[in-house]
Image (tube, grey):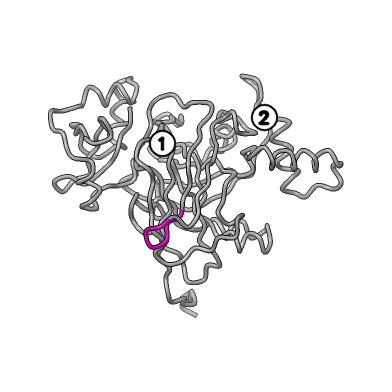
Amino acid sequence: MRLIQFEYQGRLAVGTVEDNQHIRLLEVEGGTYQLARDALAHGRALAEEARLRAGDTRLDYEQIVREGRLRAPLSHPDPAHCLVTGTGLTHLGSADTRSAMHARLAAGEETLTDSMKMFKLGLDGGKPAAGEIGAQPEWFYKGDGSIVVDPEAPLPVPAFAEDAGEEPELVGLYLIDEQGHPWRLGYAVGNEFSDHVTEKANYLWLAHSKLRACSFGPELLLDPLPVRLEGQSRILRNGEVLWQKPFVTGEENMAHSFANLEHHHFKYAQFRRPGDVHVHFFGTSTLSFGDGIQTREGDVFEISLPAFGRPLRNPVAWQQEQTIATVRHWN
């Protein structure tokens, strides 16, 4: 089952995707967030709650998209209570990249960069046995719910940015229950969207490079996730394909298990605040930046994974003016 959120008659609505062309409207007020809270209150799985709330109204999916009413598949009524984060150096990459990495790893610990040491930690201990704790991954903060851009909407790039590059990733979507337990509602396709030029200049600027907008969806997958997924990442310029490349994800293609990545996020008590939403990006191994691509105003990112239905699409919108952030004071 796949869910979408959209505007319908002046409210945030939820629907199930039927035959990739129609949406079955669910009888719930408050979007996916309220649907999930209701499922927890009733002791039901989210998919079961959605089936029980399905009404008779069927809507045209393309019309929703065409009229600009499509929204991210999960949001919090107060964006400050949605935390957007991610983990990096989690994917094994292509066979060639993996082979080169292993060659460098075999050269000896003293020759490894900090990034390669982190990657090696994942290879050696990122998939612990059940009940055990594995290696810590790289972790970063992106922002709160205010940075989430709806599918099909423009991704804003600040004027001070050096780059605007896509990162095609799986995204885990979570809700914290009233007892402080995290619940994974499902997964979505995401574009983590980073400034790779800034990051490349100095890896200690990684935190700066991640403080950008992002997008995920348009569909929330409730079914079990396949261990191997293969998708396509594309950039279109003036309606034509500028760059495209397949990418692989899923646990079979990762150095860490999802359970390990989730543990090292939710082990912090401040991330288990009842009622909060978490949007967590799980990393990637495919970037157009690695192929020398520089995006421009109006370029369109398109990320697709067949298991997730409709592709995630967003154009790029560069902001023109940079102002100095001035702090006001009384003395």
Badge 1 amino acid: Pro
The residue wearing badge 1 is 274
Q: Is residue 52 above or below residue 77?
A: above
104 sits to left or right of 178: right
Label 1: how many Cα within 10 Å (few below 14, some 14–19, many 20+)? some
Would you name the residue on which mark 2 appears? Answer: 134
Residue 30: percent from left, percent from top: 24, 40
Q: Position of residue 91 (x, y in %)?
A: 62, 38
Q: Which of marks 2 and 1 precedes in the sequence? A: 2
Q: Secondary structure at mark 1?
A: loop
Q: In the image, what residue occupies the spot 15% across and 48% down? A: 10
**How many numbered marks have been drawn onto this rendered protein structure?**
2
- Frontmost residue, 299 versus 324: 299
Q: Is residue 130 left or right of residue 314?
A: right
Foreground residue, 328 or 203? 203
| Residue under the image location 64 percent in, 39 percent down | 94
Q: Is residue 126 magenta?
A: no
Residue 279 is situated, as x and y percent measured from the top left of the image, at: 45, 42
Q: Which residues are magenta?
A: 235-240
Q: Is 261 left or right of 69, judged from the image as shown?
A: right
Q: Is residue 301 above or below residue 127?
A: below
Q: Residue placed at 42% from the left, 49% from the top?
A: 302
Residue 290 picture quarter:
bottom right
Is most of the magenta stretch helix, strand or loop? strand
**Nearest-to-viewer mark from 1 and 2:** 2
As drawn, which residue projects farthest toward the bottom? Answer: 331
Question: On residue 254, which mark appears?
Answer: none
Residue for point 46% across, 78% down: 330
118 left or right of 327 in image: right
- Residue 104 versus residue 328: which sits nearer the camera? 104
The amino acid on which the numbered mark 2 sits, given as a three-letter code, is Gly
Frontmost residue, 125 versus 225: 225
